[in-house]
Structures are given as C-alpha cells and as structure tokens.
Amino acid sequence: MTSSSDIPVLEIQDLNISYYTRAGEIPAVIDFSLTVNKGETVGLVGESGCGKSTVAWAVMQYMGHNGRIKSGTINFKGRNLNELSGENLRRIRGSEISMIYQEPFAALNPSLTVASQLMEVPITHERSSEKEAWERSLQILSDVRLPDPERIMRAYPHQLSGGQQQRVVIAMALLSKPSLLLLDEPTTALDVTVEAGIVKLIADISRKFGTSQIYISHNLGLILEICDRVFVMYSGEVVEEGSIHSIFTWPKHPYTHGLFGCIALPTADKNAAPLKPIRGQLPLPHERPRGCNFGPRCDYFQAGTCDVEAIMMEPVIGSQATDHGVRCVRWNQIEFGTEVAHGDAKPPIEIGERVLEVERMQKYYEVHDRSIAALISGRRIKLVKANEALDFDARRGETVAIVGESGCGKSTFAKVLMGLECSTGGVLRYEGREIGNLPVQKRSPRQLGSLQMIFQNPSDTLNPSHTVGGQIGRVIKKFGVESDKVKIRERVLKLLDLVKLPQDFYLRRPRQLSGGQKQRVGIARAFAGNPSMVIADEPVSALDVSVAAAVTELLTDIQREHKTTLLFISHDLSVVRYLADRIVVMYLGQIMERGTTAQIFAPPYHPYTEALLSAVPIADPEVSKREIVLQGNLPSVLNPPKGCPFVTRCPRKLGEICERERPPMQMAAEGHAIACHIPLDELRKVEPVISVPEEAERIHARQEVGAGED
Amino acid sequence: MSHATATTIPAPSYVAALVRVLKSFALLRESWVGMIGAGIVIFWVLVAILAPFLSPFDPLATLQPYAKPLTPFAGGGTFWLGTDHIGRDILSRIIWGSRTVLIYAPLAAFTAYAVGIMMGVAAGYFGGWIDDLLSGIADIILSFPVLVLYIIIIATFGASPINIILAITFATGPVVMRIVRGLVLDLKNRDYVAAAQTRGESSWRIMLVEILPNARGPLIVDACLRLGYVIITIGVLGFLGLGLPPPDPDWGGMINETRQMAMFAPHMTLFPCIAISSLILGFNLLADGLREISLRD
C-alpha cells in the first residue's frame, strides 16, 4: 500500500445525501466536505436530525434501503468508497474502518463469549491462527485497560457492566488496527464517571495507535476534551468548522454562539445570568427555509441578505487558525457582545417554610432467591437497600437536587414520594403529614395534585393514544380543580399558554409534537393540579441542547411564579449547579454529601463528589479541571460493601476502616454534611476540582484576538 | 402562532374520529399486498350484504341434481357453478354461505379477543399470582390438541352457532391472551402509565384507557390473521359435521356433504373450497399489508 503520511486518511468532498420517504426526497446532508489527517480526531457536533450520523453511515457505505449518496466523493486513503464493489467494501469495513455505536449492549452478541467475538476479527480479516487470535485479543483487552482480561475473555456480555462492555466494543474495533475509527455517541448511554474513563481511553487511542477518529456527539464539552478539530452541523449543513481552540473561543456563526448560551457553563447563573435558549425549532428537513437554514431562529437575520440564496462556507479571515470556516454571509458584520450569550437577569425566588422532611428514611426491597443454594442455607430472602437512612429537607420555592448515577436510589426515592412504593422505615413528611406509608390510592386528590412529577423521556411521558388537551384535562378533573367541562377546557388552554405552546395543540396527538414540545406538555400536566412540589426526574437530559435550555428556563420561570418546590433528580452536575439551591449527592442508596450548591462545589469534598465534578465535561476551554478517573465498577445493590458504599472505587481510601465501618456524617459547615472516614481537615486540603478564571482574565476580556497562538 | 383564533376549539367529534380511521386505512394504498387483501375481503363483505340480490336461486330449494356448471335451468336462469347432489344451486349456496362465515367468524374472533384481552391485560399489568393463575389456565388449554378440544366441546354441548363461538373462544382466547400479556408487560413500564398511577387512576382505567389503546397496532394485525384461522376452523368444523346444523348453507358443510362425489362431480367441492381459501387469503394478505405499513416510517 502506498499510503504515506501526507495523504489524508479520509477526504469527503461536496457530499450530498438524501433519504427517500413517503414525504418525498429529504436531503439529510448537504454540501459536506471534511478531511481527516493521520492521527487526528475530528468532532461532528450538532442536535438530533442535523445529519451527523448520516455522514458516518455514508463513510461506511451503509445507507439503509431508502438513503442514497446523490453526489460527492468519499476518498479513503485515495480510494473512492462510493465506487468500491461490495466485496472490496467488506474488506475495508471492520478492518480499516471501524465503527463504535452508542449502545454497547446492542453491539455485542449476548450468546457468544467476549473471546469468540474478539477472536473472530483477526481470524476473518487476517486469517490468523486461533492461538494468535487469542493472544492478540488478550493484549487488546489490557490495552483498553480492562482489569483481569483472562476473566473478561471467558465472560458473556451480560456479565459485564456497561462501561466494560463499551471497552470490549472499542477493543474489538481496534483489533484490526483500523486507520479510521468512527465513534457515534459512544458514551451517551453510560454513567458520567464511567464516561470519563472511556473518554480518556478514546483520547489515548489516537496517541497510542495513531488511529484517526471521527467523534460524533451532541455534547460540546466532550468534543472539547477529545477532538482536535470540530465541525458544527445544523440541519444537514456544516455551519462552522475549525480547530477546537478557535471555535470554542471565537465562535463566528450565530448558531454556534447560541449553543454556548444554551449550556449551563460555570459562568451561568439562574438568577444573574440565565441561559439564553435559541428561539424556535429546528426546521423539518423538507421545510428548510430559503437561504440560511438558521435564518428564522437567528438574532442577526437580515431579510434580503440571509434569505436569498444558498450560503457557502467562507474562511474566517483574520483568525490565527487557518482552517476556521463559517457558513454565514454576515459573519464579519456580527459583533457578539459578551463571550457567552445570557438572558436577562431575573429576581431570585423567595425561600419559604419547610415542605418536605426526610428523616432516616429507608426503602428495602425483598428479593426472593429461588436457587437451591439459598434453599439449603436457609437465606431465601435477600434485602436490597435501595434507600438507606436518607436525611434531608426541602423548603417552599427551593430547588433541591438529588445527584447520582444509575442505581444510586434516586428513582426509588421519587417512587416512595409519589406513593407508588411505601417506605420501610424512617419518616417522610410532606406539608406536615407522614406520607411514606401512604400509597397513592389512599391519598386525597388534593394531596395527589400538590405533589406531581415530570418524567425523563419525552417520547414516553405522554400517552400516544390521547390528545394533549384530553390528557391535561383528565388531570384537572381527577384532582378536583375543576369539574365543569367548559371550565376544564379553559384551564387546559391557560396551562398551554403557561408552557408557551399554541392553543391549537389542544387537539394534537403526541406524535405530532417534537421532544421539547412533549416535555412542555408534561410540565403543563404536572402543574395542572397547582402543585406545591414538583419532582423532575432528569426532565431535560433526553432533549437537544437548544431545546433543553428553553425547557429549563420555562421550568424555572413557572417555579418562580408559583413558588413551587422543585426536587430535581439528575446525574448532570453542570445543570444541577445552575438550577439547584441545595444538592444531595447519593451513591448506592446512601447520601454521601449534602449542602448548598456553593458548599458542594468547593472543598471539602466527599471523594465521590470530587470524582463526579471532575467527570462532567465542561464546554469552556478556559475552565480547568483536576482529572480524577474512577477505577472499578459500581458494586451490585444485592451485595453492597459492608462499610462505605464507595470503598470499591474510592481513590482516597484510607484502609481497612473504610471496608469495615459505615462512615460517620461529618458536619463541615452549617448544613454541609459529608459521610466519610477521612477527617474534615484532610478533606479541606484539596484544591477545587473546577477552577473558573475571573471574567477579567478571560482571553476575550484581554482583547487579544489575533494575537500569537502556539 | 394562532393564539387569538384558537379559543373556540371544537370538541373532538365522532366524525373526526371516523375520518382519522379512514385516513389510516388510506395508507394501505402503499402496500400492494394489503390492497389485494382488502379487495378480496371487501368483495366477500359486499357479496354477503347483497346476497338476496346476487343469488340467482333459493339456496335451499332442490331444483336439479348433479347439474354441471353453466347448465341452463328449465325454469329459467343458469346454474353458473352447477348444482349439488340434491339439486341445490352451488352459486346461491356460496353467496348465502358467505353470510354465515362473515357473521360467525368475526363474532367468534371478537369474543375470543374480548376474553383474551381481559385475561392478558390483567395478567400483564398485575403480574404476581394473578399472572401465574391466568397463564397457568392458558397453558393448560393450549396444551390440548385444538381439534380434540373442539370435538369434545361440541360433542358435549351440541352443534349450534353459539356453541361454535364458545368453542372457538375457549381455544383461541389463550393465544390472544399471550400476545396481549407480552404487549402489556412492555407498555406498563412507560412513563405515562406512571403518570396515571401518580394521579390515582384505578387499575381498570389504566389497563383499558392508558395501556390497551397503545397495543392496538399489533393487535389489529393479529386480529386479521386470527380471523383467517377462525374461518378455517369454522370450515373444518363444518367438514367434520360439527358445524352449523344443515340445511343452512355453510362452506365447510358444503365440502363435507359433497366430498364423496368429488371424483366424478368435482365442481361441488371445488367452488366452496375456492370460496374459503380466497377469503382466508384475503385476511392474511390484509394482515401482511398492515404489518408492512406499520413497520415503515
């Protein structure tokens, strides 16, 4: 092969891809050009439906039955993939180009061992011997830092955790020493601390193996941590491209700039500097506007200039980065005032009396073990401690966040609070009444209405068989807010106004709504019974960045207006930092740390909080973070560690005491409690995990645009 | 946005609901298979409705035995498909027989579905001992050979339309229950079900209003297939002499009565066979078409 280092690994030119559906031809990718050099990691970032995954599929030449590459070339090491025969493509796929998908459990065959799935790769592509294949597989498993590779080789996928599975998938992709690795949201299905480990691994791969990578993600923070260059896509087009540094520091396209205003960066604050959502919605692919696709949502739109003809990519002149390009005709006329767009300041919410009191609340599940061993030993009932001795409270108008990864018991707590499960001990008092043992059937309509929930998944939150109006109306009737038909309808229309949806959504069905709109209806439904407390279970984590910002702002506005207490359940510390007044950090059913937001984000930290803070990617190149990557897996809830639940992964473990004894709750300050054996003075000594430069020290403030850069 | 104009929102009317159903059937145009199936089914439905006008003779009258197809009748008219061994016009009997099939088969399928849905929804939603009990009953019924089951039931209770429907319900209900149970197990974990639970809805309302409508897609497809099987079953029962009591025209019965003559007068058996097969084929193709459409986006 004649591939020298100066030929780019992948060169895509003027690519146009369309899907053919009932509605006719839908252009999915328009005028797309990209070059990936050897060892380079290129990021594709954009919201759902922007065409970023389609590009990856096109590189693999796997378009499905209704997709077609209309024009353009995809050159892989000088060969045009569009013209290769099926036989030649097969040889390239999986050996020279590998792809890693979002869900590791779907990428592995559940009925084969890891060994047979890994060994297949060298055996098929290189006709290696069994022994050689075994040794290489073993080597690659230790390369992706899986502990005890011999055991992993013999395991079936279901015996591995999500993070381990994704490492196996990455190992499989690397086995054939590909020149190009396509990663399509490889960490989205994983927990944050696990994600941090995978991200570090991916970043090391290109260094170690010299693999070029295309990293697809919706998460700007991850892109910043992993990539060298980034392509920002919007509605099928690349709107801005360039090196990470220039895009993140000097975004030129109004969309890119707007995106930064939508994410809860450390500089955002829900009162002083709220998020500034991009108005409007993504255009449907077959209803794209004339001219600039972003035009209708752009604050800098100029009729007659932006809506005339298709906009071409222009190089940004004056930028020190030579490869910065932007698809905006007005880029050199636009002056973005501050570094990041912020909305107008809002008054803080008044905090009132205590609404929710949780004292040593516990929820144990009994699991019946039907195995013969259990029968002989007589231990047929195992206890799963989903919630253990929870202690915290919430006041009127306050936002309390419960933070933790999957399996930490935050959803169980929500279920007990909603009355879908009963607590097995302790006190759970809401508005002065014990509700821990009051199942939902025994609660009065008034009680039900005053405690409502917003769910995570927009596609699941509404019943697809009923109209929007019917679903909200049912809640109003059920809670006894109104009983007259006309009045119910009036109230539904009022609620639709409240969540800023047009009133003719009354008769719409959920499938006619976008994800953000569904989530708004979900909010309207939760607020239908005039709740005094709303539990929001990751309400925006499934939404696109610009939509999530709008929903978040809407939620805080309604909360402000109604003085509602918000119990915000999330794994994303950046959103939590933005929204919450107080934070409860949970791990394996227990509270590790609780305190005000400021207390949680500054030392002393619980070691787990420290790791969580470090794991959350931040899309700001000037914010520096201390790197703490957790080793090991989340222990099973069926068999938790005896002492501190975090002992198996704790980087600051003291010794035997951590394994043997429950850590004491240490009061670091008024209202700030940390459950750890490490003395507070020790905990106080650490540096802050996240350090944000003062506004005056920012590159922007120094007006050094165009100054020398290395 | 039409904020101002939207204050007078019409209540959802039955007309609108009907239009929606018709629109969803209009999607069938995209599937050739489905179109052919729908065509055949609609043809037989029309035949059944218009039977008095379409049939040239009284289906019960004995006119002229052993007439071959296309034989002209002395009393006027033609035996287009011939007559049977006791001289009844086969075309008229097939036309009137379509009524029997298209009344009893859907009725039996409907009751089987009603029972199966109730059992399946309860088993899937409640789980625990209710599921164990209902699934156990279903398993016991399903472990019997179906035909033996029919013969036992009808031999015990006698051949009558109601007993046939009961027998089919008894044997088919558990199959439907299994399908429904599987669908409910998936649907009950949706957030909208949790939302209904947290607003204190009763279990029955959650099962029938929140969950069941969302299972309708696969159930409609299955119902079309199931209807085909029920038609086969009614035919088989007729053939075994366990069907509707004579002399009412019944396609399965017609085949049974004439099968000994099949060697020298094949038309007597052939045409009822074609009638049964075409109707079953129609329902199967319709089911295939619906499934094909539902898989598309």
Image (spheres, grey):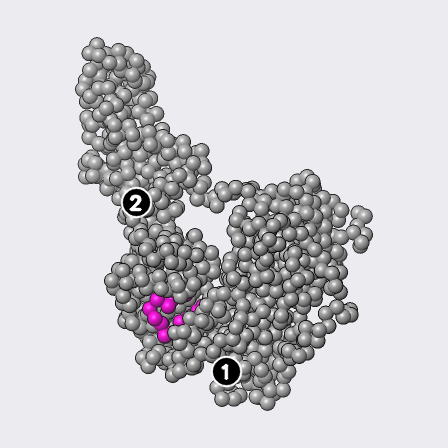
Name the residue nearer the viewer: B179 or A204: A204
Comparing marks 1 and 2, which lies closer to the viewer? Answer: 2
User: How far apart in space, not on screen, are marks 1 and 2 (Cα)?
Assistant: 58 Å
Task: Give the labeled residue for mark 1.
Answer: A595
The quarter of the rendered structure image containing the N terminus of chain B is: bottom left
Give the x, y percent position of residue A81: 69, 44
Q: Mark 1 is on which residue type?
A: Gly
Depth order, front residue of B213/A157: B213
Specify the amino acid type for callout 2: Val
Q: Is residue A434 above or below residue B101?
A: below
Image quarter for residue A189? bottom right
* Residue at x 65%, y 56% (from the top left corner): A329
Magenta-tinted stretch: A522-537
User: Would residue A250 be found to the left or right of residue A105 on screen?
Assistant: right
- Circle number at residue B15: 2
Q: Are marks 1 and 2 in contact (CB under 8 Å)?
A: no
